[in-house]
Image (spheres, rainbow, N blue to C red):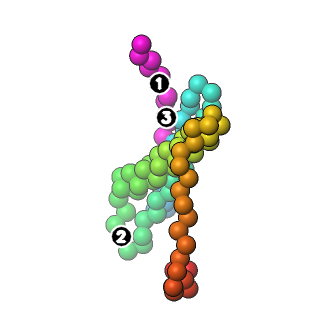
Amino acid sequence: MANTVEWPVRLTLVEEDGTTTARAVLTTATTTFTGHGTARCSPEDRDIPEIGDEIAAGRALRDLAGQLLRVADEELEGVGAAPPRRQTRVAYGWTDAMA
């Protein structure tokens, strides 16, 4: 039997002095997640607010997605079905150049 759930997302954009900030709020049945994103117009670029909106909104939604995936990973781990851990790469050689 199919189950449909709807989670509304409210996205608020504020543009001021060449900087756009975005706030994405997702409300589930049990919790609320908030993602944030920012976009800045370079002084030498033309100020086109729609582009700043798109970048800031995309970053806020990406932040929100990351939060959801982290919570899901933690819940999977709690029931013994944890996803494989990512290995941290060790830098060899000229590590000062990577700093």
Asked if residue 8 is among those painted magenta in the image, a careful observer would answer yes
Give the distance between the C-alpha atoms of the residues marked 3 and 1, in whole angstroms.
Answer: 10 Å
Q: Position of residue 87 (x, y in %)?
A: 54, 61
- Dot 2: few (<14), some (14–19), or many (≥20) neighbours within 10 Å? few
The residue singled out by tag 2 in the image is: 45
The N terminus lies in quadrant: top left
Q: Is residue 8 above or below residue 13?
A: above
Q: Residue furthest top?
A: 1
Residue 34 versus residue 20 in the image, above or below: above
- Say which residue appears at 45% left-offset and 18% top-offset: 3
Residue 95: percent from left, percent from top: 54, 83
Name the side, left or right, on which 74 lies relative to 22: right
Residue to which mark 1 is pinned: 6
Q: Write down the quadrant of residue 30 in the picture.
A: top right
- Vertical arrangement, residue 70 with respect to residue 75, above or below: below
Q: Earlier in the sequence, mark 1 or mark 2?
A: 1
The residue where tag 3 is placed is 9
Depth check: give the residue in front, 14 or 24. 24
Residue 42 in view in this figure: yes
Q: Residue at x 35, y 59 (%)?
A: 48
The spot of residue 75 in percent (x, y) is: 61, 37
